[in-house]
Image: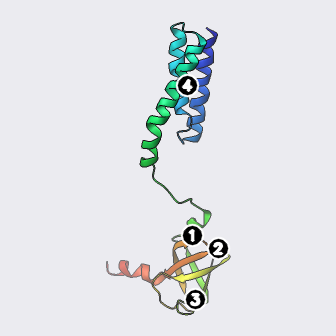
Amino acid sequence: MAYLIFWGIIFVVALIAEIASMQLISIWFALGAVGAFIAAMMNCGFAAQLGIFVIVSVFLLLLTRPLLSKLRVRQEPRTNADKLVGESAVIIEEVNPALGTGRAKTGGVDWIAVSETGEILPPDTIVLVTRVEGAKLYVRRADDFAKPFERM
């Protein structure tokens, strides 16, 4: 009876850890605990229960981990700067791709600005942020985004 409780606790703890992380780090141990729980119900000795727990856990880990790593989509880590995409900014220093100059300000923060289209953008131009790479904002004139809607 004590082993049933033990394996039940192992199952619940591994399941809670899996639900909390959603990273497939302990699901194999939860399923191994189910196997050991069944062995305990059949009155197998603790060594057999432990062996079943280890064998089931390792087997499932070896079986599924390579498949999951192939299926898992690699994503770039998201940062707070990603929230700037789609926001407006104002050019505070001329953006000139030939000279490598340009600065824009958005949300009270001064950023390096790069023209997405390669055009020169004078100071006080309102732009929209199209992407962020490191400390650089890639921008386009805000007018460029309004033009498609004007045709409607």
Mark whose residue sits in front, 1 or 2: 1
Residue type indicated by callout 4: Val
Q: In the rendered image, which quarter contains the N terminus?
A: top right
Cα separation, mark 4 vs mark 2, equals 54 Å
Marks 3/4 in contact by CB < 8 Å: the verdict is no
Marks 1/2 in contact by CB < 8 Å: the verdict is yes
When the figure is inspected, residue 17 is found, relative to residue 121, above or below; the finding is above
Tell me which label, 1 or 2, sits earlier in the chain.
1
Instruction: Give the residue at x 42% y 48%.
Output: 70
Quickly name the residue at label 4.
54
Tell me which label, 3 or 1, sits earlier in the chain.
1
The local crowd at label 1, few if under 14, some if 14 to 19, many if 20 or more residues have their Cα within 10 Å, is some
User: Which sits in the foreground, 39 or 110?
Assistant: 39
The local crowd at label 4, few if under 14, some if 14 to 19, many if 20 or more residues have their Cα within 10 Å, is some
Residue type indicated by callout 2: Gly
Quickly name the residue at label 1.
84
Tell me which label, 2 or 3, sits earlier in the chain.
3
Tell me which label, 4 or 2, sits earlier in the chain.
4
Cα separation, mark 3 vs mark 1, equals 22 Å
Instruction: Give the residue at x 56% y 66%.
Output: 82
User: Which sits in the foreground, 40 or 46?
Assistant: 46
Cα separation, mark 1 vs mark 2, equals 9 Å
Cα separation, mark 2 vs mark 3, equals 23 Å
Q: Position of residue 108 (x, y in %)?
A: 68, 76
> Please, what secondary structure does the residue beneath circle 1 have?
helix
Quickly name the residue at label 3.
100
> Please, what secondary structure does the residue beneath circle 2 have?
loop
Quickly name the residue at label 2.
107
